[in-house]
Amino acid sequence: LSICVSVNRFLVVLLILMVCLLLHSTLLRASTRPKLSEADDVVPVIVCASEERMGASMATINSVHSNTDASVFFYIVTLRDAVKLTRLYMEKTKLKGIKYKIVEFNPMVLKGKVKPDSSRPDLLHPLNFVRYYLPLLEISHKRVIYLDDDVIVQGDIKDLFNIKLNAGHAAAFATDCDLPSTHEMVRSIGMQTTYMGFLDYRKKEVKDLGIHPRDCSFNPGVFVADINEWKKQKITKQLEKWMEENVRQNIYSSAVAGGVATPPMLIVFHKKYTQLDPMWHVRHLGKINTYSHRELLQGAHLLHWNGHLNMELPCGFSLVRPESDS
């Protein structure tokens, strides 16, 4: 009996020692982790990189990297057939020193949700819809910046990242009516700046939304997103609902809207987004003569060539071609 008691005491002491060692190890690991304030210094940026527009994507990444001293982490989203080319650009150019992760997007999530549209087939590229699926990407940050691949950043990206989102807002966009200096040039080229230019108000489904056709639209090519709030509000599910509704009812199309990715965003985020400083999204540069607006462009923090004209890169920004290119 005494032997059993001794063994039990030994086991209890051994168990206590193991618990102490485990607690010590846990506390040690916790003390060596980066502080929250240090983690907050990282600016996560999402940029899509299609095989057809790889040079533009690299120019966007280069412009962000070249104009900030912040620690930027790039999520470069591409399709499987372009992973190798994306890695080549990142490993064989001066961008090889940046922090990044190549994320493969599965286009199967779009099956049955995108209506074929012969008028602008380029707008149906799967990567055009990556912005809908931010929580499904392998992202380890609570807030991210999304950038189209046809932008050049001239300001410090951390200033955009640090904007305050209003309570209950999952994202911040620049409205199409926010920059008085561009109003004249926008009207001169017939650009739409209201919901009437993006949705088919002849359809009952659109009328039932209760959105005034003259409400100002916004551009989803550049935005800041709160991933937790996005998940909470089930934004992705809402966007998919309107994609599927369009397949059934044709409530928008590239002929009506000039795009197929924007209308669902306009519906889901109507009066539920924070407005960006307009200088963080100066648009329409692919549709206007930029030389007549040099003062505006020089003061802009971000330039967006969302049009058919060739992109005229500001001085100092290159397409960053791989060293193996001729």
Image (cartoon, rainbow, N blue to C red):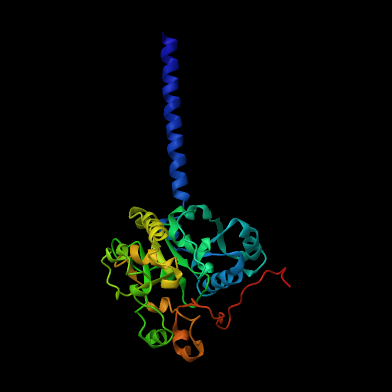
Residue 105 drawn at (x, y percent): 53, 56
Residue at 42% across / 59% down in the picture? 247
Q: Quadrant of the C terminus?
A: bottom right
- Residue 314 vertical placement versus 241 (above, below): below
Residue reaching furthest to the bottom = 292
Residue 4 drawn at (x, y percent): 43, 12
Q: In front here: 321 or 284?
A: 284
Residue 286 drawn at (x, y percent): 50, 80
Q: In front here: 165 or 81?
A: 81
Specify the quadrant of the image occupied by residue 1: top left
Residue at 48% across / 89% down in the picture? 294
218 with respect to 63 (left or right): left
Specify the quadrant of the image occupied by residue 200: bottom left
- Residue 196 vertical placement versus 85 (above, below): below
Q: In front here: 275 or 38?
A: 275
Residue 73 drawn at (x, y percent): 51, 62
Residue reaching furthest to the top = 1
Q: In front here: 174 or 309?
A: 309
